[in-house]
Amino acid sequence: MIEDEKMKKDDLYIEAKRLAENLRKEKLESYAERIIFAMESGSTGTEIIMALRWHIIDILKNKDIKISKYIKNNAIRLCKEIDNLLK
């Protein structure tokens, strides 16, 4: 963790890109693209972070897709970090 247990936005973006890469490895290209699109299309940091959160939660709630426990745990952790950042 970085500075008083909160992840910096730059680190959050790195982790989001890593999540997208891992989704691609599991042949979940459309979900990976949603993560990348959220980062590339947002105007402000807050807009990007909120879009990332929405897409990550959508992935986690979707019972029709199979993701590894590793990806699921990373997605949950990233979502928690976003929540902390938005406080």
Image (tube, helix red, strand yellow):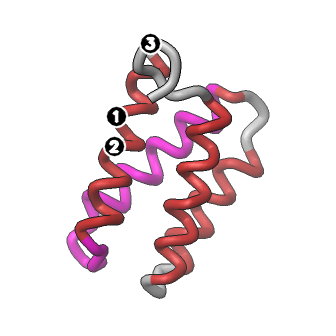
Q: Is residue 59 above or below residue 50?
A: below
In the image: residue 44, left or right of residue 70: right
- Counting from the top left corner in percent of width and height, residue 7 is at 51, 28
Q: Are marks 2 and 1 in contact (CB under 8 Å)?
A: yes
User: Which residue is denoted by mark 1 in the rendering?
Assistant: 80
Residue 4 is tagged as: 3
- Counting from the top left corner in percent of width and height, residue 56 is at 42, 52
User: Which residue is denoted by mark 2 in the rendering?
Assistant: 77
| Residue at 41% over, 20% down | 5
Picture quarter containing residue 79?
A: top left
Residue 42 is tagged as: none
Read off the magenta span: 46-68
| Prevailing secondary structure class for the magenta stretch in the rendered image | helix
Nearest the viewer among 40 and 22 is: 22
Q: CA distance from mark 2 to mark 1?
A: 5 Å
- Counting from the top left corner in percent of width and height, residue 62 is at 28, 66
Front disc: 3 or 2: 3
Nearest the viewer among 6 and 50 is: 6
